[in-house]
Amino acid sequence: MAIPIWDRMVSRWQEQRRRRSIRHHQIEWDADSVRVIACFKNGRSEVEWSKDWCEIRKAVAYKLDLVFYDCIRLGLEDGSGRWTGMDEEMPGWDEFMADLPDHLPGAKRWEDVFDQVARPPFRENATVLFERRRDRC
């Protein structure tokens, strides 16, 4: 019984250590998929999350209240109901948001909904940008 507890403690410690070594995250995408990349302080990088565009079921823009300022975020839901988030402070954000309708047909254009998400300040202002109505692309 002590071994599983020890394994969990070591695993938790390793994950915390890994998180502390991340310098930043960035967004990458191409015609087939979107990825969130963890960039480490030692120059190494790894894919933290990757989904084909066809697997994205929903995209929701919202704000996170960080007390002194707001951070605009985008949540992407895959077919299994798992969400991942990205935010305006990640390298590639502006270009990604501009390209989003090219990869998710029917998605609202960022420039058309930015004010709806950004204002008023310090409110979540969740706005659905895209929702897939069928199971296939």
Image: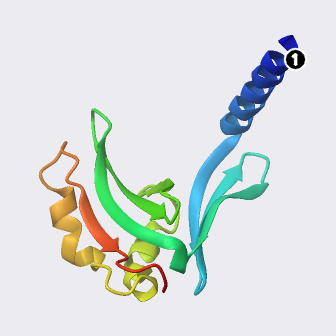
Question: In the image, is residue 122 above or below residue 14?
Answer: below
Picture coordinates of residue 87, whole percent (x, y): 43, 56
**Which residue is label 1 attached to?**
3
Picture coordinates of residue 26, whole percent (x, y): 58, 61
Q: Residue pushed farthest right? A: 3
Residue type, label 1: Ile
Question: In the image, is residue 122 above or below residue 131?
Answer: above
Q: Residues within 10 Å of mark 1 (few under 14, many from 20)?
A: few
Question: In the image, is residue 113 above or below residue 101?
Answer: above
Query: Is residue 56 shown left or right of residue 11?
Result: left
Picture coordinates of residue 63, whole percent (x, y): 28, 50
Query: Is residue 106 shown left or right of residue 77?
Result: left
Residue drawn where x is 27% and y is 66% of the image: 128
Q: Quadrant of the N terminus?
A: top right
Query: Is residue 46 shown left or right of residue 50?
Result: right
Q: Residue pushed farthest left? A: 120
Picture coordinates of residue 86, whole percent (x, y): 47, 57
Residue drawn where x is 72% and y is 34% of the image: 15
Query: Is residue 129 shown left or right of residue 98?
Result: left
Tag 1 secondary structure = helix
Residue drawn where x is 42% and y is 82% of the image: 104
Residue drawn where x is 38% and y is 87% of the image: 105
Nearest the eye: 122 or 104 = 104
